[in-house]
Amino acid sequence: MKLLRVGTAGAETPALLDAEGILRDLSGVVPDIDGALLADEAALQQIRTAAEAGELPALDATGLRIGPPLARIGKVVCIGLNYHDHARETGAEPPAEPVIFFKAADTVVGPNDTVLVPRGSRKTDWEVELAVVIGRTARYVESAQAALGHVAGYAVAHDVSEREFQIERGGTWDKGKNCETFNPLGPWLVTADEIADPQDLPLKLWVNGELKQNGTTAEQIFPVAEVVRYVSQFMTLYPGDVINTGTPAGVAMGAPEPKPYLRAGDVVELEIEGLGRQRQEFKDA
């Protein structure tokens, strides 16, 4: 299933995109798309049954905002430097263990919402990423094989980053990762049963129409299953938590000088095969 949330920010309602590309209203079946729903197999089956029976009313998508596909996100766990090609372009050694940092849940916005370039920023960068959405509590998961059983689905994430804040201002990476609007998510949450292999997903990103990133999750240093297993050794993952799993080569930081960092007026588009497409215009904060 392709689950999403539509409407004005803070007042989104649940919806489903059916196999014919028609937007369907879920508000009569479930109150929202959140961790509680993803952990409730009976409620998910109720959605499937209603969809198959043709009981879901169509929505007019014209001019309708798409919000983040998940409400009440608990935490956003991020994996840094998780693609072989990205490590090569930045001259970094591939890490021996996953690099973990966090984004606050309030950085999450809709897939087509405006992204704000922070005040004083000189190095705002782009990063297309596969987001993993947790559907079953993961605590000390014993194997990578078992880890995928805790995944509810997948989505497109844009891990927008300010590199000067992240790397040159001391301390942890968090200052360059938690600026307002720095995590567009969606358009859909695609349930795990629709993704045969999370390590076989092409990812692309364009800036002002120019292709910048053209990668595949096959290049991940730590695959999705291992990421979920590993993270669960250090923290409990709950339904509605999100893991951003890293970005492939092609970011501004890895480009020759002068590096083409983002400015107000730039337009970024990104997509992951089967998971949908995003488009953001950048404006000054």
Image (cartoon, helix red, strand yellow):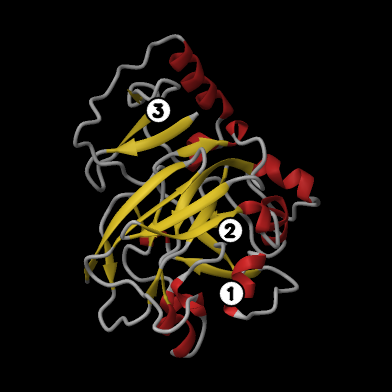
221 sits to left or right of 106: right
Tell me where residue 263 appears, x and y as whole percent: 27, 72
Who is closer to the viewer here, 13 or 3? 3
Q: Quadrant of the C terminus?
A: bottom left
Q: Residue at x 73, y 70 (%)?
A: 97
Who is closer to the viewer here, 109 or 236? 109
Within the image, what quadrant is residue 163 found in?
A: bottom left
Q: CA separation, marks 3 and 1?
A: 37 Å
The tag on residue 225 is: none
Lower position in the chain sequence, tag 2 or tag 1: 1
Q: Single out the residue that lies furthest toward the left.
A: 63
Q: Mark 3–mark 1 contact, CB under 8 Å? A: no
Q: Give the class, few, some or many, for how many residues have Cα within 10 Å of label 1's Cα (few <14, many ≥20).
A: some
Residue beneath disc 3: 17
The tag on residue 89 is: 1
Who is closer to the viewer here, 229 or 250? 250
The three-letter code of the residue at mark 1 reads Glu
In this rendering, the answer to whether 229 lies above or below 78 is above
Q: CA separation, marks 2 and 1?
A: 18 Å
Which of the two marks, 2 or 1, is nearer to us in this view?
A: 1
192 sits to left or right of 53: right
